[in-house]
Image (cartoon, rainbow, N blue to C red):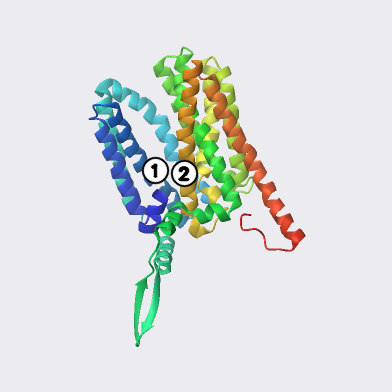
Amino acid sequence: MGSAISRYYGCRPTVIGGGITAAVGLAAASQVRALWHLYTCMALVGIGMGICLVPSMVIIQYYFDKQLARVNGIAMSGVGVGMFTLSPLLHLLCEHFGWKGALLISASIISNLCLCGALFRPSQLEKEYQSRRKDSKEVKADVDGYEFTQEIPRTNTAAISDLLQCDLICNNGPLAFFLVVSLLFGFGYYSAFLFLVAHAIDIGITEMTASFLLSIAGLCSLTGRLSHGFLIDLGFLSAANLYTISICMCGFCCLVYPLSNYYVTLAIFTAIFGFFSGIMNSLVPIVPKELVDDNRVSGAVGLVCFMEGVGTLLGVYIMGALYDATGNYTYSFYSAGFALCLGAILMLVEPCMRRLCAKIKSLHHQEQPAWC
């Protein structure tokens, strides 16, 4: 949704609208009286945050071409700072003001997204893309010496296809592979983060001490986000290769979490997980840029974020169901680790598929299939 709105109206109004939506959802959540009310308000918060996410990634690419990975890492480092500081902060807010007061204060913090969005000055490149999109919907005609412009009517099917970016999925094999990897990433990464503190409490660690695991992950995530850009910009690794290494390491950490029964070992693997997950999150807008044209980056990033959201939704329910069935988080973390490792395997397979398509083209002397 954020991708589609930003393509039509620009990044600035999209982020402002998303910030208002998220802040209203949190403020409303502080007044709920039933569980389904809370579900509805949190869904509103999720929609608002999702709307803000894509244009916040895309606008960086409108202004920077050289050293994009480094600049994007600096911009995304704010997420690591938030993970490091907000976990203990929210715990203290709940202790001093209760959950209602904590939600209201969180709503006031989230409302600052509107101020940040107001600073998203439209670049010349963004204006050109919007102008091309507007011109593509209009035709010029000359009748009796008078020139006029008429808008081309669009069917509902065409509008839905444009919203979902179906042509990107059908005609770009490498992007389709990366979307499947993004689904597996969302399944394993976000679910593991969600159940990490609960797993620590489950093995006898106090709640306050366990919450600092997220701070450790946030601090290491900040380090990963700031450092990975130098490796890419200096040519040591491509964005796709670094993403493959990172998702593999995150999968390894998830697989060894159930074997860690002490806080020290949990903290060590959480630090590794946070470092490489920070790299992965920062590469989300970088890898699609290598797979699509510049004017389609917004749509590609939106699809990637959508698939991550679907994976997160599936992962949370499946891992929760496994805990209910077994009484512990062992198989939950195993499933997350398996999903992440499978994503790493797919990232390794994709270049082989691309070379296979090129070989088919050379053997049959035909045009390369559109899917490749």
Q: CA distance from mark 1 to mark 2?
A: 8 Å
Quarter containing the C terminus: bottom right
Q: Is residue 209 above or below residue 277?
A: above
344 with respect to 293 (left or right): right
What amino acid is labelled 2 in the image?
Cys
Q: Identify the residue shown where x is 45% and y is 28%.
A: 317
The residue lying at 48 percent from left, 54 percent from top is: 165
Q: Do labels 1 and 2 touch, CB within 8 Å?
A: yes
Residue 141 location in percent, x, y?
39, 79
Q: Is residue 28 visible?
A: yes
> What x and y, as percent, mark residue 241?
63, 43
Locate residue 316, reporting x and y percent.
46, 29
Report the residue at 57% width, 33% height from top. 340
Looking at the image, residue 148 lies above or below residue 336: below
Mark 1 lies on a secondary structure that is helix
Question: Any mark on residue 305, and which?
Answer: 2
Q: Amino acid at mark 1?
A: Gly
Tell me which numbered mark, 1 or 2, is placed earlier along the sequence: 1
The residue nearer to you, when weighing 329 against 156, is 156
Question: Label 1: which residue?
Answer: 50
Pick the residue in front: 91 or 314.
314
In this view, which residue lies farthest toward the right? 363
Is residue 168 rendered to the left or right of residue 363? left
Can you see residue 193?
no
The residue at the far bottom in this view is: 144
Quarter of the view holding residue 208: top left
Q: Residues within 10 Å of mark 1 (few under 14, many from 20)?
A: many
